[in-house]
Image (cartoon, rainbow, N blue to C red):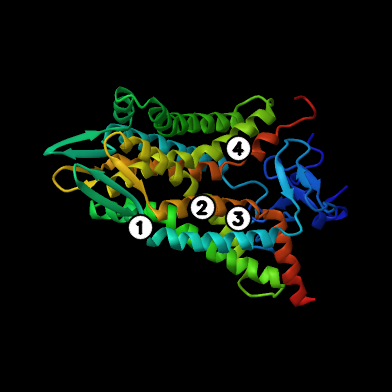
Amino acid sequence: MNENTGATHRLASCHLCYKLVPEREHDCPRCGSVMHLRKSNSIQRTLALLITASILYIPANIYPIMITDQLGDSEPSTILGGVILLIKLGSAPIAAVIFIASVMVPLSKLLAMFYLCWCVTHGAAKDFRQRTIMYRVAEFIGKWSMVDVFVVAILVALIQLEGLLMIRPGVAALAFAGVVMVTMVAAECFDPRLLWDKWEGNDD
Amino acid sequence: MTGSDLKIAELVACPSCDYLANISDLRDGERAKCVRCGHFLTEYKVDAIDRVLSFSISSLVLLIVANSYPFLSFKSSGLESVMTLPQTALALYQNGMLDLAFLVATFIILLPAFLLFLLLFLCIPLHFKKPVSWLTASGYLIFILQSWCMVDVFLIGVIVSLVKISSMATVVLGLSFWAYAGFTILFTLSLSNLDRLQCWRAIDHLNSRVVG
């Protein structure tokens, strides 16, 4: 039984300013946000956004993220292509940074969030702390995937030697920025308190 | 025990697990964590608002410097191209990607600048204990927008691109780069000193003085 939670006392906590008010209040008296005992339709919204992000992840990897025009040749490169090129050129640390930021982080974030949604709807009542930490980590690492988009923006702005060497942005950069933003909103829609609602005492 | 028996004003529900905690008797420098899930709840510092204020003012100065000098310059085969900070977004626009240009400009310059002004609007009245009408609105916007500032991510992006280009040409770091690096540190410090719960308590306190 959940003894000492806001929900058992019919108290809603404002998601923005943490003020506790009785459940019947509609708006937070302090900051004006809409009050809910739990974020409304949390799982449905999170899942919808996660699916959107997964779909956007396909064009982000298929299309070129940037196009290099060197002495009349134009050479498009995808995210993974860029990583492979960097390894061939011998800069493995940078390849690792790009690989972690643009492949591992978004994929593991998507998987983690799908898993957490599954935990709330079908999962067994266990590993509460681990799952909460998993959520907080997924929430925190999300924006770091933007590194690759910023790298493209910087290279495009910096490398403008007319006719000799020029870099143009590709469509994938926009799709990838979309993936990052949609997963950020998805993490915001998810309510970790739903994980704890199954808690039945000191079992972990 | 029912809801009415509890002293609501002294309690906070953990945003991670909804477990109630009493945080009324925190002393200077003390932090509160949720007993059930371990989530960080709040840290009370007497001079938190002053810290936020001073970090915000200094980072605003550095942001202005960062936007007015060359950021990086790039030399290869006798040719040189110089880039300023707003050009990261402008160049994308010139390449026909208005949407991406807007996003980049928002995440690294516009939103942080807007947030800094909001922080000043919030902290100056709190510092001088002057109740103003926009206090709640600026607090509201700050806590909604703060997770969308990507200045730290951008700085890592700059470092990655530096290493990426350094093999094919000479890259010179401009004054603006150092200013932006400093801005990133101060801006992060400013936001990390702004404790959500304590900040709203201060706003509450100030607003109640008008009524009382």
Residue ID at (69%, 30%): A129
Q: Which residue is mark 2?
A: B182
Q: Which residue is mark 3?
A: B190
| Image quadrant assignment for residue A166 | top left
Q: What kind of residue is marked 4? A: Arg
Residue closest to the far front: B78
Examine the rendering and report whether any part of residue B12 can be seen: yes
Separation of disc 1 and disc 4 at Cα?
33 Å
What is the quadrant of the C terminus of chain A in the image?
top right
Residue ID at (68%, 26%): A127
Disc 4 on helix, strand or loop? Answer: helix
Q: Which residue is mark 1?
A: B86
Judged left or right of residue A122, residue A152 is: left
Residue ID at (44%, 34%): A101
Disc 3 on helix, strand or loop? Answer: helix
Across and down, in percent, residue B73 comes to 31, 49
Q: Which mark is residue A136?
A: 4
Above or below, comparing residue A46 to residue B211 in the picture: above
Give the crowd class for mark 1: few <14, some 14-19, many >=20 residues within 10 Å.
some
Q: Are marks 3 and 1 on the same chain?
A: yes
